[in-house]
Image (cartoon, helix red, strand yellow):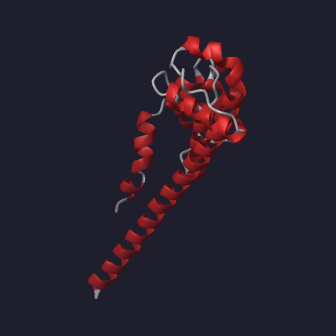
Amino acid sequence: MSTDTLYMPKRIIKKYMPDHKTIKDHKHLQMFGTLLHDGNLWHFNRRSVSGAFAVGIFCAFIPLPLQMVFAAAIAILVRVNLPISVSLVWITNPVTMPPIFYLSYNVGAFVMGQEAISSDYKLTADWFTEQIDLIWQPFLLGCFISGMIAALIAYTLIRLLWRLHIVRHIQERKARIRQQKQAKK
């Protein structure tokens, strides 16, 4: 395995990530000023990427606008990869948001021991505004719990996959060295 193959996941990730200038010039992220110039926010290593996945996915479950700003603030605070953190909040988009937030509401209702409202459930803004008095507590609790669980799973999975990739690379390198030694004999 060549060193190019080792860095293939980095290249794939970098290919789809916005560049430094795009992030630094984003109108909602300019409030962070020179904090965006910290080199650790742009590194692609096991710690930075796994942490970024955790931050981005957790922030995707925040049921407020400007999730990207929250993800950026947390990424800067814990010094993980900023572009990945900010990009992953788009897991909750207009298509995926209703089922994700409804599932989160059900998680919150279950934890609070409440009966989830399901008989008149409609995926509309009107339904949500009519029911907000009844569902806000289980909804916010469910978003927090679901976000924490999803973030923990993502963090663990990325760390594990990264580790397996490195172990496989080391094993292949050892096998190559063994073959070279045998060929010399």
Residue 163 x, y percent position in the rendering = 51, 60
Question: For the view shown, which residue lies furthest in the bottom direction?
Answer: 185
50 vs 111, left or right, is left
Instruction: Name which residue lies at 42% across and 34% down.
Output: 16
**Foreground pick, 93 / 123:** 123
Residue 29 x, y percent position in the rendering = 63, 22
**Quadrant location, the C terminus:** bottom left
The quarter of the picture where residue 57 lies is: top right
138 vs 177, left or right, is right
**Is residue 39 visible in the rendered structure shown here?**
no
**Foreground pick, 124 / 53:** 124
**Foreground pick, 75 / 181:** 75
Residue 70 x, y percent position in the rendering = 67, 28
**Is residue 124 visible in the rendered structure shown here?**
yes
**Foreground pick, 52 / 125:** 125
183 vs 118, left or right, is left
**Quadrant location, the N terminus:** bottom left
Instruction: Name which residue lies at 66% across and 29% down.
Output: 139
Instruction: Name which residue lies at 52% across and 25% down.
Output: 98
Q: Is residue 10 above or below residue 162?
A: above
Q: Is residue 181 above or below residue 49?
A: below
Report the number of numbered marks.
0
Instruction: Name which residue lies at 69% across and 31% down.
Output: 138
Residue 39 x, y percent position in the rendering = 62, 39
